[in-house]
Image (cartoon, rainbow, N blue to C red):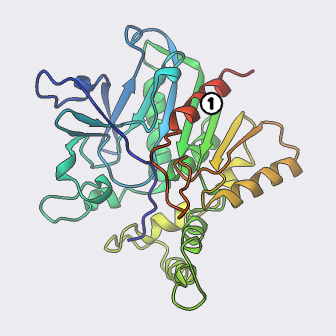
Amino acid sequence: MKFLLSIFTICFTLPIFAQKTKAEDFGFRHLQILYNSDTVDILIKSKKGEELKRKPFFLFCQGSLPQPLIKKNGAKLYSVFPFETDSLEKDYHLVIISKPYIPLVAEANTLGPDFIYLDPKTGKIPKNYSNRNLLDYYVDRNLKVIDFLEALPYADSTKLIVAGHSEGSTIASKLALKSEKVTRLIYASGCPFGRIMAMIGQDRATETDTDSTRYGESEFDYWEQVVNDKNNMDDSNGDTNKATYDFSEPAIHYLEKLTIPVLICYGTKDFCAPYNDYLHVEMLRQQKKNFTFKAYIGLEHNFFPLTANGQPNYDQFNWNKVANDWWRWTKQK
């Protein structure tokens, strides 16, 4: 399956006094718009008591995988955002947008591996999702969502923060290039040289010898097949060729054109770290003063340290520190 895992999902326990089935039951506002006849679900998380206070929006573009935004299991709610939102809620209304044709709310035990939603009739990822799981679909849809949000009475349209993690960082960077409404960009755990380079890097990290674990070489074969049929929308092996091709356009092409403040953050043990290091070098060479780089030493793709055998140590959760760093950066002049 040609997917890249994106966000580590945490869970916490909520007091359950009645069956919770709606986004509002979990402390979110749930809004909907139509985009090209598709229903788009939008969740807004605000500081309690300040739901109608005029604040800027903080739009978070999540990574890959067709997961419902709200995943629950009895008294447990799996995180919608990968971090506690308290600090960011002080100054912003937080926004996250659903994946196309994926239910907003689902019981975790009905989902597939990595909380992927599978069509109950076919046992496969919904075709309507795969047909829309494309970079430009997400960017253009999010532009419409921004227009909708900024017309709300509690919107402060003088500022708009857009953040993206993993695949979401590519969406966020192209969105920032296309929209003058975006005033700051946070690019987290992305691969500035595109998805295929991330896939090659991920496979190279698991190779152990020169003969039997040539995983990276197989990605070149896959990429050649994608390039030769780049508009193919067959999703039988995971992402479509078109999705892989479009997301493999190097995000550095979007980033280097930006003049707004940009924060690049990543773990130095992420398989994409060398590409972000190169981006840092290149922005220094171009004397781009609007870029800030934050490298988290010894952390991986989701900001966990690694154990002695190279596996993420899930006992040391750093996402909240990362989110606090984001909040402090957005307040800098």
Q: Nearer the viewer, residue 93 or 308?
A: 308
**Residue drawn where x is 53% and y is 46% of the image:** 165
Q: Is residue 146 left or right of residue 332?
A: left
Q: Nearer the viewer, residue 283 or 295?
A: 295
Q: Position of residue 125 (x, y in %)?
A: 26, 61
Is label 1 in a helix, a strand or a loop? helix
Q: Nearer the viewer, residue 241 or 191?
A: 191
Query: Where the C terminus falls, by quadrant?
Result: top right
**Residue drawn where x is 46% and y is 64% of the image:** 243
Q: Position of residue 118 (x, y in %)?
A: 22, 58
Residue 181 visible in rendering: no
Does residue 303 lie above or below 90 as drawn? below
Residue type at mark 1 is Asp
**Residue drawn where x is 49% and y is 74% of the image:** 230
Does residue 80 lie above or below 148 as drawn? below
Q: Is residue 285 left or right of residue 197?
A: right
According to the image, label 1 marks what residue? 325
**Residue extending furthest toward the front:** 308
Residue 3 in which image quadrant: bottom left
Residue 122 visible in rendering: yes
Does residue 207 lie above or below 255 as drawn? below
Q: Position of residue 188 (x, y in %)?
A: 59, 45
Query: Where the N terminus falls, by quadrant?
Result: bottom left
Does residue 22 lie above or below 227 as drawn? above
**Residue drawn where x is 58% and y is 28% of the image:** 324
Residue 263 in which image quadrant: top right
Q: Position of residue 272 (x, y in %)?
A: 63, 59
For disc 1, the neighbor class at 10 Å (few under 14, some 14 to 19, many from 20) is: some
